[in-house]
Structures are given as C-alpha cells and as structure tokens.
Amino acid sequence: MPKEMDEPKQQPGAGCPIRGVLDRIGDQWSLLTLEALEDGKKRFNELMREIGDISKQMLSKTLRHLEQDGFVRRTVYPQVPPRVEYELTELGQSFLIPMKTLIGWAEQNQQAIISARQRHENA
Amino acid sequence: MPKEMDEPKQQPGAGCPIRGVLDRIGDQWSLLTLEALEDGKKRFNELMREIGDISKQMLSKTLRHLEQDGFVRRTVYPQVPPRVEYELTELGQSFLIPMKTLIGWAEQNQQAIISARQRHENA
DNA sequence: CGGCATCCGTAATGATACTG
DNA sequence: CAGTATCATTACGGATGCCG
C-alpha cells in the first residue's frame, strides 16, 4: 500500500471521522450488503442472489472489508461442501440506525432529486 | 456507455432509492463538500482550502453533481474578477439531518472500527 | 459452495497548463 | 478568481477459471 499514514493537515483526516468511515460504507456495495444482512445470517451465494448484480469478487471484497472493520462476523462451518455464514455484529447492527435514517431520507426525497436532475438534463 | 438502462431485477434498483442517492453522496468528496457548506455561502477557493486535499477538478465535478441533484445552488456574480458562491439549497440542508446522524455515529464508533481494523491487521 | 487469482476494459483522479 | 481541457496513472469492476 502506497499511503496508509496520511494527511499532515488537520481539517481532512483529523477532525473528520467521516472520512475513515465513509471510505468504507461509501463504496458501491457496503450499504447494500449490510442491508441484505439486516434480517439475519446469510450465506455467500444467498447474498449474491439477494443483492442481485454484484460479482463474486466485489461481494468477497466487500465482506472482507466489513469483517475487517468489525461490522460483520464470518463463520465457517468445517463441512464437506463448505458453508460460510455472515451476520452483523453489534457494531454492524448499531450502524443500521443511522443508515436507516439516511435511507429514509433518500426515500422521501428521491423524487426531488430526480426532478432536479431532469431539470438539469434539459437545461 | 454500455449500460445505462438496467436491472431487470427488483431488489437492487427498484425498491432501493438508496442506490441513486448513494451513488452521489457516496463518493469521496460529496459529503465533505456538503459539510463545508454547512455554515453558509462559500466561494470556490474557500471550499478548496477548507476541504484541504481536494483538487480543482474534483471540487468542480463534485459541485456540479451536487448542483445537478439540487443540493447546492451556484451563484455567479458578473464581476471582473469572477466571483462564484455556493450554498446549500433547502434539499441540501434537509440532507444535513441524516448526514449528522451518520457523522455522529461515526464519531462515537470510530474507535471501535479502528480497533477492529488493527485486530485484523495483526491477525 | 466459497472465494482467491488473473486478465482486461473503463472510469476515477491528480497534476498541470490554459482561458475568460 | 473560477474554472475547463488534457495527459498519465491508477483503481475499480466485471468475467472467468481454478482450487480447497
């Protein structure tokens, strides 16, 4: 990794826990994955199907990130056909709260956003 | 562009206003920019300085996106040294609410996340 | 079944120069 | 000051194949 220690500046990295968190949940799939895990344990391919248009690689990578950050717990069952289950940790579940707030806002305001976008398209 | 019309599936795109919104606010700079605009009108270079490590191009692009989505209003003063100011719209301000919730959570839990990350690094 | 490794095209991004 | 245009570099994302 090229940079892991960073920003000699204060504004960006120091006062902003947002960055560290955002970088993880801000990507294309983390939120969707967390949402998919909302209602309990899921297996890898279950998550694949549920999310629908995520690739193995991305799901894998996303899950590893989430696991690494303590949002998700990974359980491997030492069986012949491997069985791996993912579930939210306490941290992961607590994150659902602010996430819900965000989603709620998105639901309420998506129309306004779509309208604004169209206004600009035709402008 | 290869795909602009998409998802024959329902889960991902249909029931999820999250996607549309996330794609915009989920990027590296949108949240930071909105936060920088929280306390009122700002000029382009002011935002540059405040955010710190964003490039002209990225700030420009981010602002255009936010403007396009109706989060930000851009005002150009027809003066000799150009003066352009950015400010949050109603929509943009209303978005601060869920955003605050998210930031608050991030602040409270960043330590747990950092710990989890380190635990994995050394594992 | 789970998921890492590889290949490859696309898109994001930083740096810099240039314009009004 | 406020950007846009261009270029080079990298990161991302999907598809596929292989292995435990």
Image: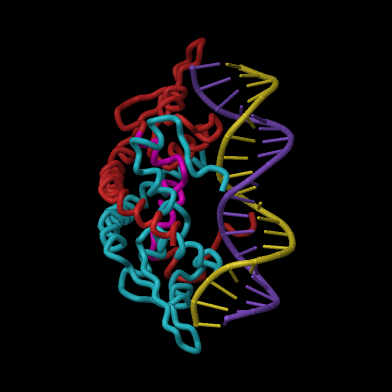
Chain colours: A cyan, B red, C yellow, D purple
Residue at image position (40%, 71%) is A74
Vertically, is B51 above or below B91? above
Residue A91 image point, x, y percent: 29, 60
Q: Would residue B18 be counted in the magenta stretch?
A: yes
Start-end of magenta stretch: B15-35
Taking the image as shown, residue D15 lies to the left or right of residue B21, namely: right
The total number of labels drawn is 0
Residue B75 image point, x, y percent: 42, 24
In depth, the one of A4 and A103 nearer the eye is A4
Which residue of the protein is positioned furthest toward the front in this rendering? Answer: B122
Taking the image as shown, residue B108 lies to the left or right of residue A32, namely: left
Vertically, is B52 above or below C11? above
Which residue of the protein is positioned furthest toward the top in this rendering? Answer: B80
Taking the image as shown, residue C4 lies to the left or right of residue C16, namely: left
In depth, the one of A13 and D12 nearer the eye is A13
Q: Would residue A100 be counted in the magenta stretch?
A: no
Taking the image as shown, residue B68 lies to the left or right of residue B6, namely: left
Query: Of helix, strand and loop, which mostly describes the magenta segment?
Result: helix
Image quadrant in which the C terminus of chain B is located: bottom left
Residue at image position (38%, 30%) is A10
Residue at image position (39%, 35%) is B72
Residue at image position (43%, 54%) is B20
Residue B47 image point, x, y percent: 42, 27
- The answer to which image quadrant residue B57 occupies is top right
Image quadrant in which the N terminus of chain B is located: bottom right
Which residue of the protein is positioned furthest toward the bottom in this rendering? Answer: A80
Residue B67 image point, x, y percent: 44, 36
In depth, the one of A121 and C14 nearer the eye is C14
